[in-house]
Amino acid sequence: MAPSVGFDLDMTLIDSRPGIAATYRALTRRTGVHVDVALAVSRLGPPLRHEIGQWFPPEEIDTAVAQFRALYPEHAITPSRLLPGAAAAVELVRSRGGRVVVVTSKLGRLARLHLDHLGLPVDEVAGDLFAEGKATALREHGVQVYVGDHTADMVAAQAAAIPGIGVASGPCPAAHLRAAGAATVIDDLTGFPEALDSLLRLAW
């Protein structure tokens, strides 16, 4: 049986930095609270609350998160782009009879907006999950390999007892991905076919 393959979204499949930066700028205009946009988009991966908490006092975090998410569809979707090899990676899995499952810290409905806009066909989206929390969705959807750019994605793969493919296209260098338990690390998704076949020992 062809395996399901899981992918993280931000900085694995898509470069969402321009759109996220635009959303933070809109949030600053709305709230008057300065966010260092360059710094914020350089460390994508953890849940939104974590980043918002670097700029807003604790009692304002929930409101700021809600405002950011309300602004997101208008400001973040159009500027985002597929990363090199992303479309081909998804097509490879689907062409071999596999299922593509996106497991991300982003809300599922916002992730879907990106995927639909960019025309990336996936079978399932599980959102609002991070690190070990992603393992639940990976197991639920029968994912057998998980691909991500963050060390927390490799933690998720280990927690789900599946191999993780680290992609050095995000904030975490290759050495950190390996140290976090990646079974293999590639520079970007153009290296995905070889990495997948190596992990699955040409099982397809």
Image: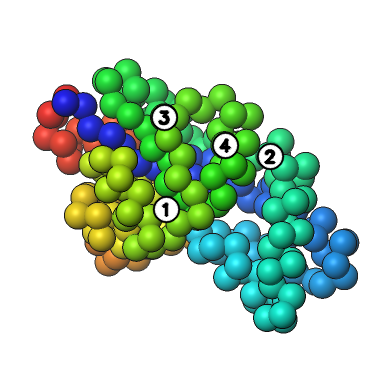
Q: What residue is pinned by disc 4? A: 112
Viewer-closest of 66 and 120: 66
Judge the density around disc 3: few (<14), some (14-19), many (≥20) Cα neighbours within 10 Å: few
| Real-space Cα separation, disc 2 to disc 4, in angstroms | 10 Å
Amino acid type of the residue tagged 2 in the rendering: Ile
Badge nearest the viewer, 1 or 3:
3
Point out the tag, 2 or 3, that comes first from the N-terminus.
2
Amino acid type of the residue tagged 1 in the rendering: Asp
Left or right: residue 172 compared with residue 176: right
Residue 12 appears anywhere in the view: no
Left or right: residue 177 compared with residue 144: right
Does 129 sit above or below residue 93? below
Name the secondary structure under disc 3. loop
| Real-space Cα separation, disc 4 to disc 3, in angstroms | 11 Å
* Label at residue 77: 2
* Label at residue 123: 3
| Real-space Cα separation, disc 4 to disc 1, in angstroms | 19 Å
* Label at residue 157: none
